[in-house]
Amino acid sequence: MNKAFFIACSNLYNMKTRNTYLFFLSIFSFFILSFTHSKRTFKEDSHFARRINKSSSGDNPYYIIISKKTYELKVYDDQGWYATYPCVFGSNDLRDKFMEGDKRTPEGQFKIILKKNDSKWKFEMLLDYPDQNSYKKFNERKAEGIIPKKARIGGGIAIHATRPQEEWTVDYYQNWTDGCVSLKYSEAADLYSYIPVGTPVTIEK
């Protein structure tokens, strides 16, 4: 009788110990996964392929491809991949921009038409949105009834910096702009320093 009681108590103790272990293991795993998936690591931040001499011909060797899927702005030149910067966008709805006020970032092939020191964002590179293709898509959607007849296409889309104290928005994938592409303040400064007006920019899904 005493032996059976002892065995039962021992089993109960082992079960509680195992459940306690599993509970704390689950909590630990949750924190590890939350950290690794919600915040970019330093390794994922800025990847600079190389710092080569710019084209000796004086022509602009650069073009930019921005991926909404990977939250990355990649710079290429006449020798291939040059640098990668993490970025964020407008609305969490990552579809193409439909109309003014939807806060979505437009997709398509654009170019930088103006560089300026903006009063809010400091480093700003304005794109030529809306271009001819943007108007074509806009008018087709309006004809199909996807957007209201009185809708306007919008404009003022740029690549620009966060405020210096708000670089964390890029670390945590916080889409916050009105449709622009935003880089960390320090990294926007770097991009701004060498990308000239006229640089082609492709924004894709």
Image: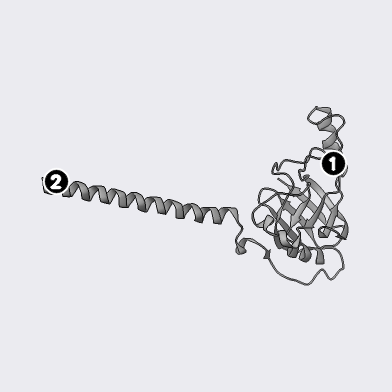
- Residue 115: which quarter of the image? bottom right
Quadrant in the picture for the C terminus: top right
Q: Which residue does the numbered mark 1 point to in the structure image?
A: 133
Mark toward the viewer: 1 or 2: 2
172 sits left or right of 123 in the view: left
**Residue type, numbered disc 2:** Ala
**Could you classify mark 2 by the number of other residues whose Cα lies within 10 Å: few (under 14), some (14-19), or many (20 or more)?**
few
Q: CA distance from mark 1 to mark 2?
A: 82 Å
**Residue type, numbered disc 1:** Asn
Q: Residue at x 88, y 42 (%)?
A: 132
- Residue 86: which quarter of the image? bottom right
Q: Residue at x 14, y 46 (%)?
A: 4
Q: Residue at x 74, y 54 (%)?
A: 65
Give residue 101's position: percent from left, percent from top.
81, 40
C-beta proximity under 8 Å, tags 1 and 2: no
**Could you say whether the residue bearing mark 1 is in a helix, strand or loop?**
helix
Q: Which residue does the numbered mark 2 point to in the structure image?
A: 4
Q: Residue at x 86, y 68 (%)?
A: 57
